[in-house]
Amino acid sequence: MSEENNTKGREDDVRIEADADLDDSVLAEEAAGETIKKLRGRLAACAKEKQEYMDKWQRATADFLNVRKRDSEDNERFKKYAAESLMIELLPVLQSFDLAFGNKEAWEKVDKNWRMGVEYIASQLKAVLEANGLKELNPLGQKFDPARDEAAEFEEVSEKDRDQEVLSVIQKGYAFYDRVLKAPKVKVGELRTPFKT
């Protein structure tokens, strides 16, 4: 009987140990589940933080590229218009040449070699200025544009299609790239209609 008690006692011990092992494994599973939840939460927080950093980095990169592009455009614009004041100062020289060449009678009386030399110098100056953005404005035959032209006088015309047309250019104008530096002085056609009473 004592063997039966011993066996029964051992079975009880094994059951207690098995119950203890089950309790420990359940506790371990619960602890592992909580740890996994915590890790998943941390992983989600890290993913969110990573996305925020990525968004900020992309915005900063885009801002940087936009600033670089604006700086490049500003530099190009500066280079383009840096010589504008020099062009304005040289316009009277070009106009003096035009005036000298415009008086055909007096110009033909000048020695031919000297005249050819002056014409060559004028053409060289004009070529250099044109290569650097200066354009001659000669709106002859075009519609009058008050943003570009200066109307020095008006002449009556009878044809409707010649109304507001530039009939002649009194003095040439000049533009530097897209800016008018000196408006051409022009004679403009104006259609006159008789008043009816």
Image (cartoon, rainbow, N blue to C red):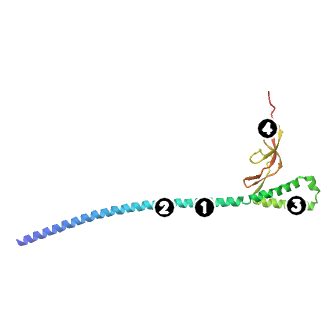
Would you say 125 lies left or right of 2 here? right
Residue 49 horizontal side relative to residue 187, left or right = left
Mark 1: amino acid: Arg
Horizontal and vertical percent position of residue 32: 30, 64
Query: CB under 8 Å between callouts 4 and 3?
Result: no
Near-viewer residue (50 or 12): 50
Q: CA distance from mark 4 to mark 3?
A: 43 Å
Cα distance between the residues tagged 4 and 2: 67 Å
Identity of the residue drawn at 45% across and 62% down: 50
- Sequence-earlier tag: 1 or 3: 1
Residue named by callout 1: 68
Q: Amino acid at mark 4?
A: Lys
Kindly identify which residue carries mark 3: 118
Location of the C terminus (image quadrant): top right
Residue at label 4? Answer: 160
For the residues labelled 1 and 3, the Cα–Cα distance comes to 47 Å
Residue positioned most to the left: 1
Quarter of the picture holding the N terminus: bottom left
**Amino acid, disc 3:** Val
Q: What SS does tag 4 mark?
A: helix
* Front of the two marks 1 and 4: 1
What whole-number distance in Å separates the C-alpha atoms at marks 1 and 2?
Answer: 21 Å
Numbered label attached to residue 54: 2
Q: Earlier in the sequence, mark 1 or mark 2?
A: 2
